[in-house]
Amino acid sequence: MFCAAFSLGACSQNAGEPPIAEGKQLFNDPQFGGSTNASSCSSCHPGGKGLENAASNPQLLSVINACITGPLGGQAIAEDSAEMLSLKGYIESLGGDE
């Protein structure tokens, strides 16, 4: 496990796992993706409601961007970006299969 500038005790994720806590922050951020209407993912999915099975959707990244550009009125983010991978990790964690 690699944890630059942190003690090993501060690292809650295994190497290669998405940072779920950061994904949760993005999920609740009304400015994420350049949202133009002060909405966040949690505006439509409070507490992740309705996303319990999202991890099984092979188009999850496209769906996330559709939500950003549609209901949030923002700009799509790169599917391989750290933000997208963090958000995807958080959404996948909602299914309880961690």
Image (cartoon, rainbow, N blue to C red):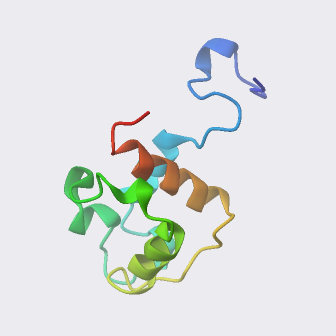
The correct choice, above or below, for 29 with respect to 61 in the image is above
Residue at the spot x=44%, y=85% of the render? Answer: 69
Residue 56 position in % (x across, y down): 42, 57
Q: How many marks?
A: 0
Q: Residue at image x 27%, y 61%?
A: 42
Where does the N terminus fall, quadrant-wise? top right
Q: Residue at x 22, y 68 (%)?
A: 44
Q: Is residue 4 left or right of residue 80?
A: right
Question: Residue 95, position in %: x, y?
Answer: 33, 44
> What residue sits 59% from the left and 74% below the top?
77
Residue 9 in picture, x, y percent from top left: 61, 13
Asked if residue 22 is positioned above or below residue 87 in the image, the reply reads: above
Please say if 29 is above or below 62.
Answer: above
| Residue 64 placement, left or right of 80 | left
The C terminus, quarter of image: top left
- Location of residue 73 (image quadrant): bottom left
Looking at the picture, how far across and down is residue 47, in whole percent?
23, 50
Tell me: residue 59, above or below residue 52.
below
Examine the image and state in which quarter residue 39 appears.
Answer: bottom left
